[in-house]
Amino acid sequence: MSEKKTPKKKIRTMSHWTAVVFWICLILIATPVCVLGWILLSSSMDTGKPIFGNRYEGDLDPAITEKDMGAVEDAVKTVEGVNDTFVTMTSATLRVYADVADDAKEETCNAVADQIYAKVAEVLDPSVYFTRTESMKMYDMEIHVYTLPERTDAEGENFVYVIDTKTSNMTDPEKQTVSVAKDPAVAEQLRQNVIDRLAAEEAAEQAEQQGESNEGNAEGEDTPAEGE
């Protein structure tokens, strides 16, 4: 009786399709794993690094150059009453700072702010550089006029700080005296709250120190004297 043999061709065909299915499954599994691994690796490598971009791309045309800012600073220096000045650009906002006499009043600071705005307008036309169009954002402008760089609560000081602002959405600039509270009653209450909080913290600290002192004295009294 002869033995029945399995055709070798059929075995080879099945083995071939098994290998094909295996490699297809391996590729399908390995592809998302590799992609996910690359994302995690690149994210970990970029951790702590700032992301730079330009949110004004296509806007701010014409642009304000360093030369323009220098010309603005030179023009502002000619304004009577300005002791010192500097110009900066922060996030598409041209900021002009002007230090005036320490005894200048609010009216004087407002007048100086108007003169500075006129000087800036001579260099940079507000209708061009500080007015947005239907399709383009443009620059904002802030003019800071102050008698003191910061308030120190020194007795007899004269602290006046005026900001003249024109955004690209505004037709005309608007001034605000930021050294004066819009609501004096609320401002006084906030200052009193700070005073009360500091006084409470100081009283609590003194009470804690006194308690520690009393505890130390009590321990000293309970300890028997040497030789008893």
Image (cartoon, rainbow, N blue to C red):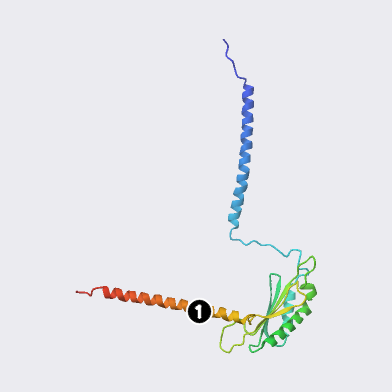
Could you tell me which residue is drawn at 63 percent across and 43 percent down?
31
Task: Please state which of residues 213 and 70 is positioned toward the viewer in this rendering.
Answer: 213
Give the position of the C terminus as an image quadrant.
bottom left
Q: Is residue 183 left or right of residue 206?
A: right
Could you tell me which residue is drawn at 62 percent across and 45 percent down?
32
In the image, residue 89 lies at what x, y percent? 69, 73
In this picture, is 10 found above or below 143? above
The quarter of the displayed image where residue 174 is located? bottom right
Q: How many marks?
A: 1
In this picture, is 5 found above or below 193? above
Q: Is residue 10 left or right of residue 134?
A: left
The quarter of the displayed image where residue 63 is located? bottom right
The quarter of the displayed image where residue 81 is located? bottom right
In the image, residue 28 lies at what x, y percent? 63, 40
Task: Please state which of residues 200 and 167 is positioned toward the viewer in this rendering.
Answer: 200
Task: Please state which of residues 67 and 197 is positioned toward the viewer in this rendering.
Answer: 197
Task: Please state which of residues 83 and 199 is positioned toward the viewer in this rendering.
Answer: 199
Give the position of the N terminus as an image quadrant.
top right
Q: Residue furthest top?
A: 1
In the image, residue 146 lies at what x, y percent? 65, 83
Could you tell me which residue is drawn at 61 percent across and 48 percent down?
36
Badge 1 density bin: few <14, some 14–19, many ≥20, Cα 10 Å: few
Could you tell me which residue is drawn at 70 percent across and 87 percent down?
107
Which residue is label 1 attached to?
Answer: 196
In the image, residue 148 lies at what x, y percent? 62, 84
Helix, strand or loop at label 1? It is helix
Mark 1: amino acid: Asp
Q: Residue furthest front?
A: 185
